[in-house]
């Protein structure tokens, strides 16, 4: 079942790479998400395909000042957030395998959504973007929150099922949840409510076809 399939116009589409930072993607990172290892190569190939098609490639980073002045309620949930996501620390950088290239854009955010108190919306609208492709981590947190905010702003959203990484959750009173189950539920909810969900190879093929039609 698929509820929507957007018409992909390369001139009005951008790639959003969410939080592929060392703190989340490297084994010694304080917030390591093991399943990110499975998506790095796909994102790298996708980013290159987008650059070749002249799509903006935009990286989101979760970064705080580090002095406690801008973390608010997040510090209640993550007491060490001012240390692990502090500006200037190695962990907040994008992993080397996905290092931004000349012409790419990096947007820093304080909370989960890439749109919350950032200039992401301005960046997209200044380029007449109406469609965004979302990949990265964590599927049901920063990725999904960004997707929901994008939908609320009337963007067409494409989520890549095999280029978003979820994390497992411990028992918070309702039973532990595996990363696989989190991924399945998050993708299903987004596909039903907010976005088109597809795989990376299909997206690259669709993008290539759209670019060929323009030539």
Image (cartoon, rainbow, N blue to C red):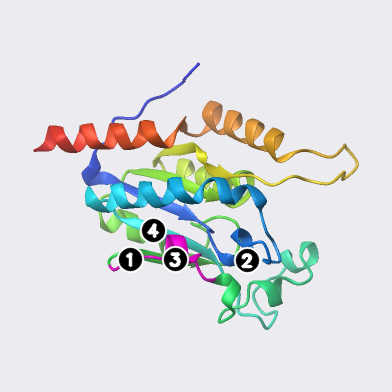
Q: Which residue is mark 2?
A: 23
Image position, residue 160 (x, y; %):
47, 38
Residue at screen point 88% across, 37% down? 174
What numbered label is drawn on residue 58? 4
Q: Circle 4 — which element?
A: strand
Q: Are marks 4 and 3 in contact (CB under 8 Å)?
A: yes
Report, in whole angstroms, how far the alpha carbon at label 1 lies from the one at label 4. Answer: 10 Å
Image position, residue 50 (x, y; %):
29, 49
Report, in whole angstroms, how far the alpha carbon at label 2 lies from the one at label 3. Answer: 17 Å
Image position, residue 80 (x, y; %):
76, 72
Query: In the shown orientation, is residue 35 left or right of residue 107?
Result: right
Q: Which residue is mark 1?
A: 101
Q: Quadrant of residue 181?
A: top right
Residue at screen point 40% across, 52% down? 44
Q: Circle 1 — which element?
A: loop
Q: Is residue 125 magenta?
A: no
Q: Look at discs 1 and 4 and give the one toward the viewer.
A: 1
Q: Mark 1 or mark 3, which is nearer the start of the sequence?
A: 1
What numbered label is drawn on residue 139? none
Q: Circle 2 — which element?
A: helix
Above or below residue 149? Residue 67 is: below
Q: Which residues are magenta?
A: 93-102
Q: Residues within 10 Å of mark 3 (few under 14, many from 20)?
A: some
What numbered label is drawn on residue 107? 3
Q: Are marks 2 and 1 in contact (CB under 8 Å)?
A: no
């Amino acid at each position: 079942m698929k509820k929507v399939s957007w018409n992909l116009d390369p001139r009005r589409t951008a790639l959003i790479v969410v939080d592929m930072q060392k703190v989340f993607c490297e084994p010694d990172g304080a917030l390591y998400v093991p399943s990110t290892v499975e998506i790095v190569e796909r994102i790298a190939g996708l980013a290159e395909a987008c650059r070749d098609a002249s799509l903006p490639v935009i990286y989101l980073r979760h970064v705080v000042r580090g002095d406690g002045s801008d973390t608010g309620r997040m510090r209640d949930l993550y007491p060490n957030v001012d240390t692990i996501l502090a500006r200037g620390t190695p962990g907040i950088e994008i992993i080397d395998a996905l290092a931004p290239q000349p012409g790419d854009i990096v947007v820093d955010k304080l909370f989960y959504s890439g749109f919350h108190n950032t200039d992401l919306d301005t960046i997209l609208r200044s380029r007449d973007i109406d469609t965004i492709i979302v990949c990265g981590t964590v599927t049901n947190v920063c990725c999904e929150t960004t997707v929901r905010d994008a939908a609320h702003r009337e963007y067409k959203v494409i989520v890549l099922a095999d280029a978003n990484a979820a994390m497992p959750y411990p028992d918070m009173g309702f039973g532990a949840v595996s990363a696989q189950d989190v991924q399945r539920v998050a993708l299903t909810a987004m596909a039903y409510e907010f976005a088109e969900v597809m795989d990376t190879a299909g997206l690259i093929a669709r993008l290539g076809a759209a670019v060929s039609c323009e030539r």
